[in-house]
Image (cartoon, grey):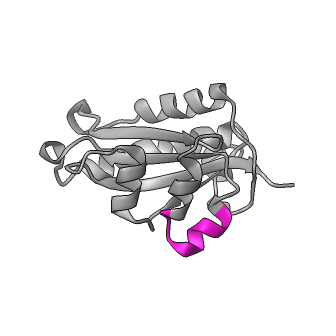
Amino acid sequence: MSDSAIFKRNSSVNFSPQDLSQKEIDSIIQASIWAPSSRNLQPWKIIAVKRSSDRFDRLVKAMSEGNQEWAQNSGLIIIFCTENEQNISPKTFLNIGFSGQNAMIRSAELGLESHPIGGWDEDKVKEISNIPSDSQVAFLLVIGKKAK
C-alpha cells in the first residue's frame, strides 16, 4: 500500500508554470464528482480555472499574500464551494472536503502536485468566478506539475 497515491500526495509549493492538459483536468474533476456525500446530495460546485484563463492571475491575487508567491506557478486552481445557502448543513463542508480529497489523490495518481488553500478574499474570489452571493467558498485547490 505504500505506493498508493494517498501516500505520495503532499502539499507542494514547488510548481512548474505550465498548463495541465484538458484530459488531466477532466480526470481530476471526475474524481471529485465521484466523492461520497451525505444522502448523496453532492452539495458542492467545482470551478476549474486554468493557468491560461484571464481569471487565473486575478484569482491568485485574491489569495492571502503567502499563498500568492508559490500558487502563481501552478497550472490549475480549483474552487470548491457550496451551491447555495439553502443546501448548507453541518455536513456540507465535510462532504466538500471528501470531493477535494478525491481531487488531490487523483492528482497524485497523475503525477501532479497539489496544495489546498484556506486563505483568500471571499468577495474577490466570488466576483472573479461569478459565484452567487448565497454560496460560500470552502477552499481553493492549487494543482500543477512539479518544478524540476
Give the tally of numbered discs. 0
Q: Residue at the location (41% across, 31% down)?
A: 33
Which residue is rendered at x = 54% and y = 63% of the image?
A: 61
Specify the quadrant of the image occupied by residue 71.
bottom right
Side of 79 where 13 appears, left or right: right
Residue 104, percent across and down? 56, 46
Residue farthest right in this picture = 148
Range of the magenta residues? 62-70
Residue 27 inside the magenta-drawn segment: no
Where does the N terminus fall, quadrant-wise?
Answer: top right
Q: Determine if residue 98 is in view.
A: no
In the displayed structure, 21 sits above or below 1; it is above
Across and down, in percent, residue 39 comes to 20, 34
- Side of 37 where 142 appears, left or right: right
Q: Where 85 sits versus 32, above or below?
A: below
Q: Residue furthest left?
A: 86
Q: Give the x, y percent position of residue 49.
A: 53, 42
Q: Position of residue 118 (x, y in %)?
A: 44, 65
Based on the picture, tell me whether residue 68 belongs to the magenta stretch: yes
Residue in the foreground of this view, choosing between 99 and 6 = 99
